[in-house]
Amino acid sequence: MLDRHCLYIGIFQLIIWVGVANGEFYSSVDSMQDLAQVEEELLNATRSYVESQQKQLDFYRRYVEQIKREHEWATSQLKLDDYLGHPLHAFRLIKRLVRDWDSLIFEPILANNAREEFRAFVEVLSRDLGYPDQSELQGAIKGLARLQKVYNLATSDLADGIIGGLNYGSDLRWRECYEIGVQLFDLGEYQRSLEWLQVAFILLRNSPREEKDADHYLSDIREYASMANFELGNPKKAARLLSQILESQPTHSAQQTQKYLESRVPGKNVQETKPSWFSNYTRLCQGRRLPEERSGDPLRCYLDGKRHAYFTLAPLQVEPVHLDPDINVYHGMLSSKQILSIFEEADKEEMVRSAVAGSGGEGTVRDLRVSQQTWLDYKSPVMNSVGRIIQFVSGFDMAGAEHMQVANYGVGGQYEPHPDYFEVNLPKNFEGDRISTSMFYLSDVEQGGYTVFTKLNVFLPPVKGALVMWHNLHRSLHVDARTLHAGCPVIVGSKRIGNIWMHSGYQEFRRPCNLTSDSYKSLAYRD
């Protein structure tokens, strides 16, 4: 029998650690850590159950030990957030919780009435802590597909655990490649689905022949590959794949698939229409600029101790990356201790999926932005210090500042090109539009996660403790369309940033208008 007391103590402790989940795990590495703790608790419960049985449950023991080894390897080799910042690790964790635990562990165990205590444990865990579902699995897989699209990552390399030329020792098994292929098919990503199915087929075909039901799964992979080819406008290849299945397995479900496809018109292999900014976006995300002619002296870093008395003894370390509009990086603005204090303040608040601003400042959740966020006021000591830094560097009055948005980017986390200004439908609780953006990098990122300005040929790698600042409005207070920017998908690691937007109200004497309008500068950049 399971020790009911120990199980529920474990659940109680886990609730204290992670709080009550509000869904959407894949969009934040922080939330993925909660899932890792949930799986750790599931692991412990399952091991307790197995050890209490008289029979030899070899299959369950092998599964549990496999996950245990992965947890131990992750915690011994890396920090947990570094491990979960890897997209393949994140996918594997969600895939196990959505697919494997249910089909390989829960269903066989819960089918027996003598195992009610284990059933109760799972129900309490799911009810009180939340649990990933099908949408979470698809979110993680869409993140992988996004990385492939933006960074030109080969499917075979990803399956081998190779990302950006580095081998992380996180190769995927055929079942995982098959799952990715099936989910991408359901999402309408037929070409990418076909690539993953082909890798799954090769891995399974080359696996030891004691693999259970190998022939059955090879046929299933062929069937999905057939349907993907049909949707891509290759009906002959689709028919050939189905025939190969039926030659050896006449009663396979490929019979029904064959009849279904015969009744339909094949899809058309239409190239995906990409937005006008996509080529610049992907090139800059990969760290490649277009060659450009420069007039005048090249931009150089410098020390600035005259902007405010606050910086007299410790001058600002300024890296100008663009002139007109001015984009500057100020290095070493926050210490690791201050950043830790910011995280502690953020932990007191609820992290929610980041939304995209719409009419009147209202937000909607869309895949163009994949992250989680919370908002911090300036009352705590560390946030008061942050507010003073922004005021001294920008020269603006903090009366026009929004609360700082703290965001964490998870699997393939990104924010596609967007302006920070509203232009129309301004939020009612602030005077004027967003005149400036101040963005703190609260972490380094191992790969990816650049900030790019697609119309200015500028990319910025995240540097922990640095502050990036630019103006979103001309001095005339017209919007500056040149400031369109994006947060590139995180490949490996965890990206944490803190955004502070300043509004133009209360800034009349801090950044006065010129006698003539300067809005003409960005007219050619408007879509």
Image (cartoon, helix red, strand yellow):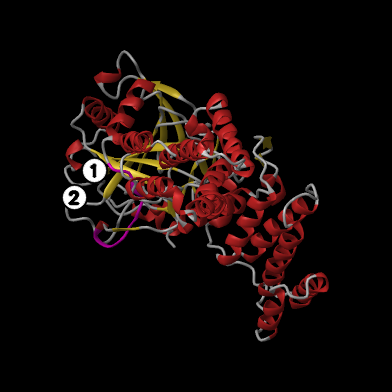
Q: Tag 2: residue type?
A: Phe
Upstream in the sequence, badge 1 or badge 2? 1
Number of marks in the rendered image? 2
Which of the 4 quarters of the picture holds residue 205? Answer: bottom right
Q: CA distance from mark 1 to mark 2?
A: 8 Å
Q: Residue at x 27, y 58 (%)?
A: 362
User: Circle 2 sits in a helix, a strand or a loop, which is it?
Assistant: loop
Residue 64 lies, with reference to residue 238, above or below; the image says above
> Which disc is residue 14 wearing?
none
> For the view shown, which residue lies furthest in the top direction?
313
Pointers 1 and 2 in contact (C-beta within 8 Å):
yes
Label 1, secondary structure: give it. Answer: loop
- Range of residues picked out in magenta: 350-360
The residue located at (51%, 34%) in the rendering is 445
Looking at the rendering, in which quadrant would you find the N terminus? top left
Mark 1: give few (<14), some (14-19) or many (20+) Cα within 10 Å. Answer: some
**Pointer 2 local density, CA inside 10 Å: few below 14, some 14–19, many at least 20:** some
Of the residues shown, which amino acid type is indicated by label 1? Glu
- Where does residue 486 sit, x and y in percent of width and height? 46, 48
Closest to the observer, 253 or 410: 253
390 left or right of 67 in image: left
Q: Residue furthest bottom?
A: 263
The residue lying at 80 percent from left, 75 percent from top is: 243
Using the image as rendered, state which of residue 123 and residue 225 is in the foreground: 123
Q: Mark 2 sits on what residue?
A: 430
Image coordinates for residue 19, horizontal then vertical, percent: 31, 40
| Quadrant for the C terminus in the image | bottom left
Q: Is residue 33 magenta?
A: no
Q: Label 1: which residue?
A: 402
